[in-house]
Amino acid sequence: MATTMTAPGRVAVRMKVNGVEYAADVEPRLLLVSFLRDNLGLTGTHIGCDTSQCGACVIHLDGEPVKSCTLLTAQANGAELTTIEGVAKNGEYDAMQMGFWEMHGLQCGYCTPGMIMTANAFLDRNPDPTEAEIRHALEGNLCRCTGYQNIVKAVQYAAKQRSGGAMEPGPGTDLDFEHKDVIEHAPEDLQDWGDQLAGQEER
Amino acid sequence: MFPNQFEYQRPDSVQAAAGLLAADPDAKLLAGGHSLIPAMKLRLASPSSLVDLGGIEGLVGIDAAGTIAIGAMTTYAMLRDSRELSRVLPMVTDAADNVGDPAVQARGTLGGALAHSDPAADFTAIFLALNGSVDVTGTNGTRTIGADDLFVDLFTTALQPDEIITSVSFPAPDSGTGMAYEKFRHPASGYAVVGVAAVVTTGSDGNVASARIAITGAPSKATRASESEQLLQGKKLNDESIAAAAAAAANGLDINGDHFASEEYRRHLVGVLTGRALTRAAAGM
């Protein structure tokens, strides 16, 4: 491995995030969630309570769900990380994302990335869980909108779909575009929308 | 929120880590970091340097053949998922599944929990009830500290400033042993408002040959309910003896009250949870 020159008081880190290698010199106190959001621009990982209780910042570190607000970037040196941005593959939502969509597993969406990361790690470990096991697994993820009922249904949907069940439409499919289109076009659409807003302000 | 500035070091041996601790009295060890980093973010702790144990090989693993030996950096998730451990020490896997939440379990370590000696930790009581011991390494060599000597006071252990827990051992339970951990969880943090670990062994005559009951969450450090243990000695473990032990469990304990639970409420919980833990232990013999 090449020697990295590190400025005094800084730490050289290397990690793979959603399949992409990154190397950086960071302050030791830089929290992993800040590194992901501010340095890498991966703002899908949210900061909620910032005290390791709410789970909005959950990502996968070497396959395990972790709260990225309670890890130093330096501790993730050499690790493989997956954030919510790495869950959809080739423009297709995964089973859990589809579950949240179909079963209305979100309202405001703030907790959703952490919920999905926690729930996916849980199904990796327990592919056929009971409802009680799902609720136990989600104890570290707080949602202030849904009352959790539909989140549990979303995880059940994903468990069924992962084990070969058909993607049955849920109450969330009453929409006239395809899920794939949303992933492909959302950034552009948002950009257009942002431009329009900016234009209005100038006027 | 982010911590004050500190120096970060990641040694590759326990000896090197002990040397770094000895060289800087203000340095702190970083294991899973799930107590330390939140405290640093709130600026309740501002160590001058962190010595990360994450780069040291050989501190992770579970050996459950004979005496059970667990590396200090073994996480709760590893304890939770260990089938061999669930066969010999079911209380340990069960309790690990109820520490915090899965993300906390993925990072929090057994050695870290014992060295931190949080008054509301789960594994301090479990360690005490199972009569465990820790192997520690310092700049002056290695030694073993037994369960009854490790916890000194609130967040205070018998570890010297340069000593590091390297592994945690539990004696293999004798036949006729039942064990259970019961806790009243804080709903947000998952910490034990009160937790009780009970390990009871009955002899061939069906009478209690040994009982160890440890309380966490209520006193300033994990503490044995000695009076309850003595009440059970030589008795049959039945509803009557369990009720007597439960009623005596808080006797002699100095119990904390705070904004989560009053002293009176915690005292009540100690009795209730001791009864439940003993009942489950009896069922698992």
Image: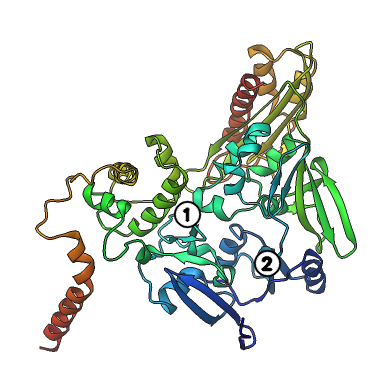
Q: Position of residue A97 (x, y in %)?
A: 29, 55
Neighbourhood count class around disc 2 (C-alpha, 10 Å): few under 14, some 14–19, many 20 upward: some
Q: Which mark is residue B121?
A: none
> With respect to residue A137, does B229 lie above or below?
above
Mark 1–mark 2 Cα distance, whole angstroms, equals 27 Å
Taking the spot 62% from the left edge, 59% from the top edge, the residue there is B32
What SS does tag 1 mark? loop
Q: Position of residue A157 (x, y in %)?
A: 29, 43
Q: Which residue is mark 2?
A: B55
**Which quadrant of the structure image shows residue A135?**
top left
Res. B158 in view: no
Neighbourhood count class around disc 1 (C-alpha, 10 Å): few under 14, some 14–19, many 20 upward: many
Quadrant that contains the C terminus of chain B: top right
Taking the spot 66% from the left edge, 13% from the top edge, the residue there is B238
Image-based side of B36 in relation to A66, left or right: right
Q: Which residue is mark 1?
A: A53
Looking at this view, is B230 or B169 the one in front? B169
Q: Position of residue B113 (x, y in %)?
A: 67, 51
> With respect to residue B48, does A6 lie above or below?
below
**Which quadrant of the structure image shows residue A28?**
bottom right
Q: Position of residue A101 (x, y in %)?
A: 23, 53
What SS does tag 2 mark? helix
> With respect to residue B22, does B124 lie above or below?
above
Instruction: Identify which amino acid the numbered label 1 is placed on.
Output: Gln
Taking the spot 45% from the left edge, 42% from the top edge, the residue there is A126
Instruction: Identify which amino acid the numbered label 2 is placed on.
Output: Gly
The chain under label 2 reads: B
